[in-house]
Amino acid sequence: MDNGKSPASVHSSVNSPVCFVAPSRSVKRPRPVKSCLECRKRKLKCDRTSPCSQCQKAQRACRYAAEGEAVSLSDGSDVEVPERTAKRNRPAVNQEPVQRSTNYAAVLEDHAARLERLERQLHGSTSSIAESSATPAQRPAASSLTTRGLTVKGGLRTRFFGQSSTRVLVNLFDEAKDFMFNRNKSSDIRELFLNIQKIHKALQDEHRKATAPITVFVDSMTPIQKRMADVLPSRAVCDTLLNIYLRGSETIYRVLHIQSFKGQYAGYWEGSPQPDAFLPQLLSILCVGYRFLGAGKGQYHDREGIHIPTASSLVRTWLDGLRGKQLVEFSTLQAELLQLMAQRMINPQNQESWTHLGLIVRMAMTMGLHRDPSEFGPRISPFWAEQRRKLWYTILELDVHMSMQCNLPCCIREGDFTCSPPRNLNDEDIHPNIEQLPLSKPIDQHTDARIQVFAASTLSMRLKIVELINRTDNLQDYQQVLEIGNELERVFEDVRYIVPAAAHSGDRQEYRRKWLSRIVLDMHCRRPLLALYRPFALSSPDAPQQIMTGYLRSSMIILSYLDELDPSSPDYHHIWHMHQLVLKQDILQAAFSVCYYMKQVTNGSTTADPLSLSSHIKSESVEEACTIASESSVLLSLPRLKTTVQKVLDGMLSRIREIGTDLRDIVSLTVVFHTSQGGTTEQKRDAIKSGVQAILDAGLQAIHASQEKIASISCRLPYRGR
């Protein structure tokens, strides 16, 4: 540009065929761009020289828009008002029309090439997304029919059921479900189911009466403390029940400081006044201990024991009457937890317990138990700081357990608390006047707190599992499930190291204590593993072999806890009763799960390939995966699976009169068990008939009625399963 004129002036040349027209504006003619690009961008006045004075001053590269280059006309500084008409007709200098046309064509070709590349990239990206979404194996697929359910009555009354409910588990067995719900049963089968329905109703009526509190105590105008004292059994009975509670419950659920409570207990019988919360705590403890003592205990009024419904109702009345500062007393929180445990002895409804526990969690948080006591300085003594930690981790354990049983979220999430776990110490090692806590003992050394301390070390994993099983629909792959599963498997190895299986010796109590410690620790980690694997092992067609085999193995371990004990030992029946009471729902779930594997192995005709036993290799079908799992160990062989489930059914029949036993669960498991073993239709029908007849006989014996008498009772609706 020798003449010093702006290159933009060529746009107004009479020889130029190029003009810029705004596509959306047809009324106004666009004005020519004269300023350099830098001045236009910065909204500066340009003198249109090359380089312009503004760019020289700022030491910038000065450039004008070339012919054919697209420029923005949105800025006011980019366009100048044509004040002098003479400049519009100024001829172009040093810019030939041929050169302008060539530049313009090159710009268009460049834009076309860039547009083509962009289209190719966009098409490739869309294709990969489509391929990714079309690949079902990348995302775990757990059927909602076999993981959750909802009952709807009247359109407004609804109840949610999770994957551990019998209502949901039955959906895994189409043949058994059709048999139970089919209205076209033969007359003999229909009569059996009708009689069982009558027995079920009779047992429900009996349980309803047994769990009703005694009105003379509940409705009395006598002060509540006097009424609670009146329902106490003799001291000898109380001594026995207190010891049973301490051995059976104060392991992972640490509510009391044992030495302090025993001191209050001795003082009460000696006649010295005790805090108002003592009697409510003692009554709840006796309820739990009496229920642990043996089958049927606490259901009926018994002078040699305690009537659990009445005692639990009186404690609830006392708690509901508290006001103000009483609600944030540490002893009140202890009484709330103990009352929840006592109530579950006669009303094992998980959803009600989950709701009640939510109130306890918030009560504890309002008292600051979720924060570590060290944050509050010397205002909380070392003794009470440790008691707060024990009680907080008891609440956490109950929250995790109840959430898994209901398949509902935890009230407490990881990160919601800073409270440290308690130390591995005996209760006698600390006292209210202690100035500094002793150092924690090694985890392999037995103490009153060892089980809770070890369980606290696995709490983070278990909280993750509860969160995971409540969002299985959002999982993208199995990686997270497998990683947490591997972590829990390592925990089982730690349990075996910390509490090794003891050889039978003359000290029966020591052997039983070690066995109980190992079972409690294993159980509280086995339950989360089963809950983690269940949605995929029982309903996902592409679950990894690690999940399929691990789920079956853990189900069989739950059902085989008692195999280590000698059935002829004097206390075996007592231990068996506690096992059935504490693990009732876990046993039922495991039995249904084993039946699922039996069904798949029986229906499939595959034989396990030794190379397929690797946990990382995916089987071709569910039947093959179940077969591989069954053939991976003698413990999991098909004959042993059948024998184990039959033992579960026999145990349930022997407890048919117990509170919490649902006759529909026994019927459902019986039908599922016999349809899962294979055979012809007639063979299955005869096996089911025999199993249902055994249920009918046990039911008649429980209600002390004959088959003729029960047949004469009218019943409008036949039994229809779950």
Image (spheres, rainbow, N blue to C red):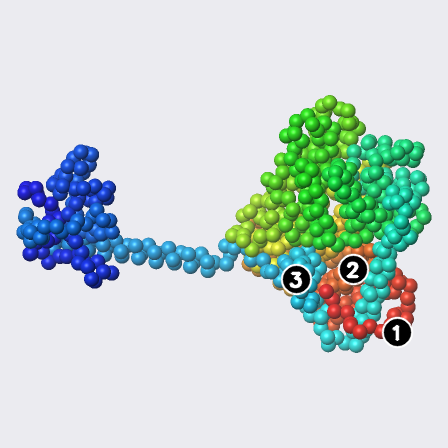
Query: What's the CA distance linking mark 3 and mark 1?
Result: 35 Å
Query: What's the CA distance linking mark 1 and mark 2?
Result: 23 Å
Which residue is located at x 43 percent, y 58 percent? 131
The answer to which quarter of the image holds residue 372 is top right
**Left or right: 131 in relation to 644:** left
Tell me the element at label 3. Answer: strand
Tell me the element at label 1. Answer: helix
Amino acid type at circle 1 is Ser
Query: What's the CA distance linking mark 3 and mark 2?
Result: 19 Å
Label 3 or label 2, whichever comes before in sequence order: 3
Label 1 or label 2, whichever comes before in sequence order: 2
- Image quarter where the N terminus lies is top left
Residue for badge 2: 662
Amino acid type at circle 2 is Asp
Give the percent coordinates (x, y) of residue 228: 88, 44
Residue 712 circle label: 1
Can residue 251 be spotted in the picture?
A: no
Residue for badge 3: 150
Between 499 and 626, the one lying in front of the other is: 499
**Residues at discs 1 and 2 in contact (Cβ within 8 Å):** no
